[in-house]
Image: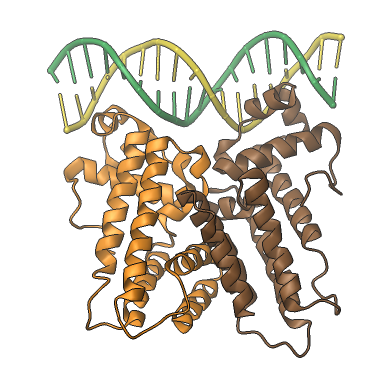
Chain colours: A orange, B brown, C yellow, D green
DNA sequence: GTCTATAATTTGATAGAC
DNA sequence: GTCTATCAAATTATAGAC
């Protein structure tokens, strides 16, 4: 999942969102401040407010941009020339790459864990992220007619999200590898 | 896992920790403020600083108190009169109760997701929580001699943590039930 | 679109009286 | 152990010039 894609945002707004996402994935919604973002982008905080008036606007935009990138990165869920394993392996790969390349876990895992304290527009965007990923995974699991599976989309997504938290908190990447292996074995 | 147990803290300090934990589980480390805690407890913020000078002291104490409660609640991991299923079901039950009773997920799931932004003493306490829960689960899986399992402690803990996030973020409790079912089936 | 300037609030933290 | 008083810094947000 590259960071330079078909985003609806360009220029300064896009730069702001990149910086904001990195901070939110590291420390949650409260870990980003308008001033910090501005400094990193090389502008003033008032200019950040021009692009995203309220912090909830910024948060929702970050989540929606992230959602589009993930859905784009996992690709088609119903390509009949692919096995279920190939498809799920691509979902796993998106998260594995994020952890290995950037040392960051899923944005919506971090925000999802603090849902109860998020502004409504942000919490709703996080909710939609999971609905979309669950829908993708459901399709990925069922589109191959003669390949019955023991696992549900929810179980796969749960497993992946939790594995990222555990790997990050214990600094042991093999918790992620182990989860990935278990998921693929269960297909 | 009742909230009124063998804590090393009593009186005002204990009350402070209870309020702080509730806020941290809802919104992360930054979601608690000395003033908010003080107001809820019925004292002034300077008094909170008396018990926990720095915020990192408060955070570490909250995590350590929580860890002791969880480890106490899951009970013995190596009782030879119990099946592996019975033991793991008790671990699941601790988290199910937390979600149903309080609507809150695991404290160390919330904090673990924002590990990169936590003060070192807090991040280390979270790390130790997971090491202890993993050790408990490992014992629970292996102590029954003739019951081989397909699942590792890491996979079980990952699965549970992720299921809580997904259930909370989508407001669909069945993601947790489904994970619990999958775990027990995998034993 | 970006800036300066500033407001209003909140935050973690400390000194010292009781 | 709790209080009053206070501080310095950070936060979100806005008004208005360029």
Left or right of A101, for residue B71: right
Observer-nearest of B171 and D12: B171
Query: In the image, residue B117 lies at what x, y percent?
Result: 52, 49
User: Where does the C terminus of chain B fall, quadrant-wise?
Assistant: bottom right
Observer-nearest of B133 and A142: A142
**Taking B89 as reference, is B23 above or below it?**
above
**Taking B127 as reference, is B7 above or below it?**
above
The residue sitting at 53% across, 63% down in the picture is A162
Query: In the image, residue A123 lies at what x, y percent?
Result: 42, 42
Query: In the image, residue A52 lies at what x, y percent?
Result: 28, 33
Image label count: 0
Observer-nearest of B37 and B141: B141
Query: In the image, residue B6 lies at what x, y percent?
Result: 87, 49
- Say whether residue A143 is visible: yes
**Taking B80 as reference, is A75 above or below it?**
above
**Taking B163 as reference, is A87 above or below it?**
below
The residue sitting at 34% across, 62% down in the picture is A135
Observer-nearest of A53 and A130: A130
Residue extending farthest bottom: B146
The residue sitting at 32% across, 35% down in the picture is A57
Quadrant of the image occupied by residue B71: bottom right
- Say whether residue A19 is visible: no
Left or right of B105, for residue B75: right
Quadrant of the image occupied by residue B185: bottom right
């Amino acid at each position: 999942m590259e960071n330079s894609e078909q985003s609806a945002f360009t220029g300064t707004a896009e730069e702001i969102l990149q910086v904001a996402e990195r901070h939110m994935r590291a420390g949650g919604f409260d870990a980003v401040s308008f001033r910090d973002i501005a400094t990193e982008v090389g502008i003033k905080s008032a200019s950040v407010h021009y692009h995203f008036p309220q912090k909830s606007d910024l948060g929702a935009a970050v989540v929606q941009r992230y959602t589009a990138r993930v859905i784009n990165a996992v690709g088609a869920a119903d390509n009949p020339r692919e096995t279920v394993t190939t498809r799920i392996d691509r979902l796993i790969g998106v998260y594995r790459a994020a952890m290995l390349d950037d040392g960051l876990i899923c944005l919506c895992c971090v925000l999802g864990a603090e849902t109860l304290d998020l502004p409504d527009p942000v919490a709703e965007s996080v909710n939609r992220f999971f609905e979309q990923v669950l829908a993708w995974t459901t399709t990925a699991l069922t589109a191959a007619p003669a390949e019955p599976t023991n696992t549900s989309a929810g179980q796969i997504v749960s497993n992946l999200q939790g594995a990222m938290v555990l790997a990050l908190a214990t600094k042991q990447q093999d918790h992620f590898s182990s989860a990935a292996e278990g998921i693929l074995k269960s297909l």
